[in-house]
Image (spheres, helix red, strand yellow):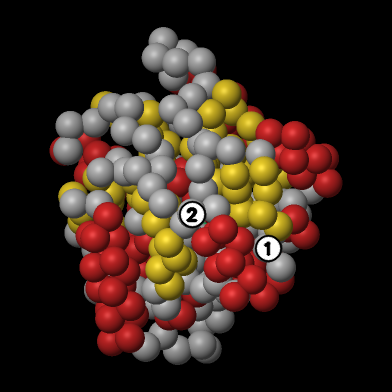
Amino acid sequence: MSCFQPTKVLMCPPTYFKVNYEINPWMDVQNFVDQDLASLQWQNLYNQISCFCPDIKTIEPHPDLPDLVFIDAGFLYKNIFIPSNFRFPERQPESVIFADWFASNGYEIKKIEKEFYFEGHGDTLWVDDKTVYCGHGFRSHPDSYKHIQNILSDEAILDIRLIKLTDPRFYHLDTCFCPINKDTALVFADAIDVDSLKKIKTELDLIEVRSEDALNFACNSLVFGQHIIMPFASRWLQEQLKSRGFHVHIVEVSEFIKAGGACKCLCMPL
Ligand code: ARG
């Protein structure tokens, strides 16, 4: 399976989605989430994804875990699943739920040591079957990736490329960086440490998004071949993508942005 053409994905219905704690600068418990609108937006996203990916699995939502809707489940390499080790206590119980789901769906589970915070799918973005960009700075600990490489040493030598994040509003790598094929990525450069940025510039062709796009989560997008599902894209960004042969599909997810996530966090390729 190519990481840009997933044929199977995992989502979690937003039945219990709300903002009842604050663990990133987007979250404000006073900012009411319209649950009907959230359900509608999630269903629209589901329908749009189903046009490009035939097999959508869902995990059972949990009444005490509103952020379970964001599939920051863990690190998946072939049939091996390493569950996330969430930094904030509010999200820590999600790890067991994801581990159980992956175990009961035939994946082999390997655990990361407790001292390494690691936020899975939110901080790890693949560009090919060996190369993965890994965020750190707010949530995942940089050493967690060495540890993951050790865990997987019998299976693969991964090309792990660290990116340090610098702006707390862009706390997960998938909020400011989005590979769209093996050579090209969207990036919000202001949220990335200068040395990391210098390095990525030598590795990828970058489309540097402006703050209007970044603040509307344009980097939190889902790629299915030449189709890209985005929560927002300015006219300029749409042109950039179209000129590279992409079809842009905008799906509004305003209710989820109140919790600091958008299209890409709501769906994990399997
Ligand atoms: N409220 C969640 C948190 O702060 C949002 C997670 C969004 N996930 C992502 N992959 N960006 O952890």
- Compare residues 6 and 36 and report the one nearer the observer: 6
Q: Is residue 192 left or right of residue 250?
A: right
The percent coordinates of residue 144 (x first, y second) are 57, 32
Residue that extends furthest to the top in the rendered view of this protein: 154
- Compare residues 233 and 146 and report the one nearer the observer: 233
For the point 23% across and 60% down, the residue is 50
The percent coordinates of residue 60 (x first, y second) are 20, 59
Q: Is residue 11 above or below residue 205?
A: below
Name the amino acid, label 1.
Answer: Val
**In this figure, which residue is indicated by the disc labeled 1?**
209
For the point 59% across and 75% down, the residue is 235
Name the amino acid, label 2.
Answer: Gly
Q: Is residue 71 above or below residue 151?
A: below
Q: Is residue 79 above or below residue 93?
A: above
The percent coordinates of residue 79 (x first, y second) are 28, 27
Q: Is residue 190 left or right of residue 267?
A: right
**In this figure, which residue is indicated by the disc labeled 2?**
245
Q: Is residue 53 above or below residue 196?
A: below
Location of the N terminus by quadrant is top left
Per the rendering, the mark at residue 31 is none
Residue 49 falls in image quadrant: bottom left
For the point 39% across and 73% down, the residue is 251
* Helix, strand or loop for disc 1: loop
